[in-house]
Amino acid sequence: MKKTLLCALALTLALGTALPGAAALTKGPAAGKTVKVGVIADVTGSGAVYGTMQRNAYDLANDDVKTGIIDAGGANLSFDVEDAASDPAQVVNLMQKFTTDGATPLVLGPTLSGEAFRAFPIAKAANFPVMGTSTTAEGVTAIGPTIFRDSLAESQAIPPTVARVQQTWHAKTVAIIYGDDNAFTKTDGDLFAREFQKTGASVVDTETFHIGDKDFGPALTKIASKKPDAIAIGGLFPEATQIIAQAGKLGIKAHMLGGNGLNSTQMYQTAGPASLGVVVGAAWFIGGKYTGNLEFVKRFKAKYGTTPDQFAAQAYAAAQVVASLVKAGAVTKDALLAGLRNVHVVQTVLGPIAFDQNRDVRAAPVVLKIVKGGFAYF
Amino acid sequence: MLAQQLVNGLFLGAVYALFAVGYTLVFGVLDILNLAHAAIYMIAAFTAYSLVAHGLPIGVAFAGGTILAGTVGILLDRIAFAPLRRRNAGTLVPLISSIGAAIIIGAIARGIYGIDERHFVDGGIDSPPIHIGPVTFTAVEAIIFATAIALMLVLSYVLRATTLGRNIRAVSQDRIAAALLGVNIERTIAATFFIASALGGAAGILTGLEYNSVSIDMAGSIELKGLAVIILGGMGSITGAVIGGFVIGAVETLAVAYGLSEWRDALTFGVMFVILVARPAGIFGARALRNA
Amino acid sequence: MTFFAQFYAQHSRLLDEIGINALLALSLSVSLQAGQLALAQAGFAGIAAYVSAIASMQYRWPLFASILLAVACSTLVAALLAYPVRRLRGIFLAIATVGFGEIVRVIVNNVSITGGAEGLSGIPNNVNTGIIYSGLALVALALFGLSRTKFALAVALTREDEAAARGVGVDTGMVRFASLALGGAIAGLAGALYAHAFYFLTPADFGFPRMEEILVWCVIGGVTSPIGAVAGAAFLSILPEIIRGLADFREITNGVILLAVILFAPSGLSVLWRSRRATVPRDA
């Protein structure tokens, strides 16, 4: 009798561990409870290039929770993505809806920093936990004690990147080109100037552009006439790819670098050989061997046909952080808020994540360079 | 450096001019400001991209995209403007109608292509820089410039020397008189929309090739600039649109060259505003369609 | 009572938006009723929003003083704008005013006192729904009062046929000037209230896309009807939330609604309460 029981037990265990992902289907204190996290993203409109990546990441996360790849301790965790259509009014309405519907315990997003400044005060007033995954402008987390952020701020990314490239390049002169109508790109411009000057280089030319600009001939011509050793780009990848491509067309040979905004495989696709060697101070490396990262990239590519970019990775990482809190039993807004405040380290596709006392992510940038078809360590 | 900047301005201006020419043609003939022109510019670029992605050579894709643009133009007129003409609805109503049409075209494009930027050639179009004295440009840029100029010359020829051109000019000057003289008004208007939209579409395809990039937000960036160009040149004047295109291209380029980059748009619209106040007819005056 | 309290807690921001959008729509409607397609109201609202914000943040002016100053500024700018555009009609006036709006946006984007591209945050959040709707009621009352005067008649005559109006002795220049200035004042009120209700401003808030939106509200509601303007603003502000379920089809729905109204119901929503077909100005 005992032998049969023992055999049955052994068989069950063997079968259990053989099933894919079954080992991760643990049962935490929140097992069986439903947790619906609200997400605000610009799936349509001017921010769609970024918001769609985020939505795709959350949809993948939903799948992964169901199959156990993301371990939520048996809870019925899902991410409900709502489209704010890049309309500030809709961002505000969605935040109000989520914070007052009584069923949502936490909100992730919105996509753009400007939107965060509008929406986060609502969360603060409601003592409601929110996490930004792409809102990297100055002052976002300072809005209130319930605001967290898993995306590396520009002020965290740029200084180490500049210090690192100067060790190799020793550039004496640098030109800076940045977007003047966006908080993110403007911050980049200021930071690059300051950090290069700290290393003893002088800024020989500063040019500005607008989001949506395609023609950088005039600005690059001017920069070329000053013959800088390096060109720093404060921009997002749609404009950055054009800048790099057109610099190539004009025969410019200076070193080039940029911040977070350039972390997309679109760079090589659009700009081609001109983009080889461009340095990117990024928050995430697509080839980085962090826990589950390479598999995440594979699953994302299989589901959507394109590789994920940094926006997707940061969104997915946020999902992972929330899942780890839910697994530990936090299902209400107060429990999740306490969880975020006390989280030690969560292993994500961005690497290990923890928050500092300002509720910003505690991390350093990874300095990459563009190679054919992707990125490599600089 | 100035020589290079002038070349930059020329290349930029050529495509602005090509875009504006279609804009102003419709206004000259019909008194309609067609705000869906930029959407057609964008969808032509996507069409050419699709054809190239299916393996067709770029010349064929260019022709295909241009013809599609022209056809969309005719459809646009049938759906959004012709019913209003029958109703004698004035100038404000077609403007709003064109806004609605632009939104719909944009939504269709987004539905088919998504929000990602598309590239004609992954990894960049291989065209090494050519150096002539102080000036550098690529063969592709030169071809784009030449194509834009060629198209505008073709238009000028059509308007001046063909029956269709004569009819278009007649309708723009006095529709009733033209009808009395036996001109088929609706067919002429359809032809006008075809030509105008085809040229706008061509501008879109050339822009896509220039930057190796086609995306939904192409429309937004050229929309208002096109307005400044046609005001400067004189609404309804083809020559004006061409000259206006080069002037605005020069204004933008020189603004950057002289350190005024963030005031670029203000300068462009400032020029436009001054023209409207001082000489609303623009450089080439009057609302009748002029010979090119 | 709790139902209303719950409803308000969930939708107060939307209600605030509707109130401000209604004011913006009225500011354009005033010009449209005079037959002028003056598309500068977004610019006026933007100027007032920043003036009010800066006055209360930098100079610590109390709320109502800031708002008054802001409205005075926007009205002044509108009055000044009226002069150079006095001879422009139809599309030309529209384009000139759009150009004006773009110039304002660029200036706001480039000077430091407005916070530039990064925007102005931390504006004192001391305007609530009550204040917004009081402002709206005030303006509605004022416009209603005006509609009973001879001025209203002069406005209608100018819209229908400017030459004929002049022929019967209407000072059309004065009508055009007054309607633009009045539009500037109302838009200014909307902008100032917006600044304090939504506590964050960027230059893009009052650019051409915004102006297009306001125009669409007025057209959907009924171009010559002030009630229509308010109705259009309210309807289109709520619409994104109602059709949220349509997800990716929201955008095309907007375009289809616009086209459908233009083609089949050019008097817009006002056809619901107007006994006879309103005349849409030919050369607005």
Image: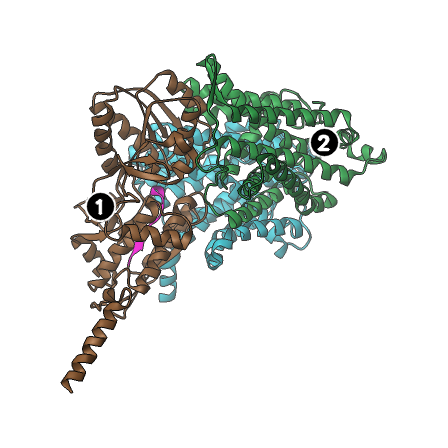
Task: Give me the disc on residue A361.
Answer: 1
Residue B173: x %, y % from top left = 75, 29
* Residue visible at 16% across and 54% down in the picture: A342
Q: CA distance from mark 1 to mark 2?
A: 72 Å
Q: In front here: B202 or B264?
A: B202
The answer to whether residue A98 is above or below residue B196 is: below
Q: In front here: C115 or B170?
A: B170
Q: Colour in which chain A is shown?
A: brown
Q: Do the residues bearing badges 1 and 2 touch, measured as CB atoms within 8 Å?
A: no
Chain letter of the residue carrying label 1: A
**Residue that badge 2 annotates:** C167
Colour green, chain: B
**Which quadrant would residue A252 be assigned to in this image?**
top left
Extent of the magenta region? A106-115
Colour cyan, chain: C
Residue B2: x %, y % from top left = 46, 14
**Which quadrant would residue B60 be assigned to in this image?**
top right
Q: Amino acid at mark 1?
A: Val
User: Element under label 1?
Assistant: loop
Screen quadrant of the N terminus of chain B: top left
* Residue visible at 62% across and 25% down in the picture: B241
* Residue visible at 31% across and 48% down in the picture: A313
Chain letter of the residue carrying label 2: C
Residue B227 is left or right of residue A37, and the answer is right
The answer to whether residue A188 is above or below residue B136 is: below
